[in-house]
Amino acid sequence: MNRVKSMKNFGAGMLYVGPALLLMIIFIFYPMVKTLYYSFFMTNARGTPVLFVGLENYTELLQSDSFLLSIKATLLFVLNTVPTGIILALFLAIIANEKLKGIDFFRVIFSSTIGVSVAAGSTIWLFIFHPSIGFLNNILTTIGLPAIQWLTDPKWALFSIALTTVWMSVGFNFIILLGGLQNISEELYESALIDGAGYWVRLFKITIPMLTPSLFFVTVVSVINSFQTFGQIDILTKGGPAESTNLIVYSIFQDAFIHYKFGIASAQAMILFVFVLIITIFQFKVGEKKVHYQ
């Protein structure tokens, strides 16, 4: 009798989770298994496996100066974008959380980049970075400084991509952090005021600790999104100059759809997957211990 009841409960549960599970199998798990399979083969131009090479694709990548440079550029990009984007969004969220007249207008402005597509945002910054008519170089020449080749100088290209990415991500981070700030109980601040706590004490003893769940979520999402950055690189620099912005995702794209080396591209994808998985697990193991849910 219990067995029949368990089967009925299982069947009822599958009616709810079945469609989502089917979509995950088709669009997530199957492509992952297929990518892992391709990473052990050499393929022809049509992507058909023709020769089993085992771990040769992986060893070739780890010995490749281009791939190692791609890893370095990716890590630098993540370090440049994630902390900057979160700190900027936190600063804007704290300002927008103040009860001031007309603050709703600024909340809309601060969150507006969430409605801008990667293609549109990259095109906007393509004009801003233009060497002769760009807004940034016009400011530099006006104050007597030399113009900068933002997208064609290896010293500045990665910074330019990072600046574009921070601008694109600040809207999403701002909304999440502002929502977290508005969920903090006013009673905590009132008690702190009665005890004589100043603004900075309330900020670091109440606001930041109570905001850690939102900060933790934003950090995890930002790190994953940074490792998956593609659109702005394709539009602004095409991985150049001198591969200074050739992040791993763009390197995968080039090997798969330009050089037709699907085996090498699959191996890179698996390395990226393992790398992001390890970092995410580390964030949950270490970062979540500092999260205050009460």
Image (cartoon, rainbow, N blue to C red):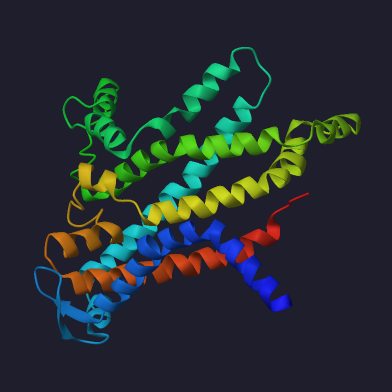
Q: Nearer the viewer, residue 54 or 196?
A: 54
- Taking the view exactly as shown, the residue that stands out farthest to the left is 45
Quadrant into which the N terminus falls: bottom right
Q: Residue at x 49, y 27 (%)?
A: 110
Q: Nearer the viewer, residue 159 or 263?
A: 263
Position above or below: 18 against 130: below
Q: Residue at x 66, y 48 (%)?
A: 212
Q: Splitting the image into 4 quarters, where does residue 101 fall? A: top right
- Judged left or right of residue 257, residue 218 is right
- Judged left or right of residue 223, residue 241 is left
Q: Residue at x 27, y 25 (%)?
A: 135
Position above or below: 290 against 180: below
Q: Residue at x 20, y 86 (%)?
A: 53
Position above or below: 240 against 70: above
Image coordinates of residue 18 in percent, x first then y, are 50, 61
| Total number of numbered discs in the rendering | 0
Image coordinates of residue 268 in percent, x first then y, are 29, 70
Q: Nearer the viewer, residue 265 or 23?
A: 23
Q: Splitting the image into 4 quarters, where does residue 291 fall? A: bottom right
Image coordinates of residue 242 in percent, x first then y, are 17, 56
Image coordinates of residue 117 in percent, x first then y, are 33, 36
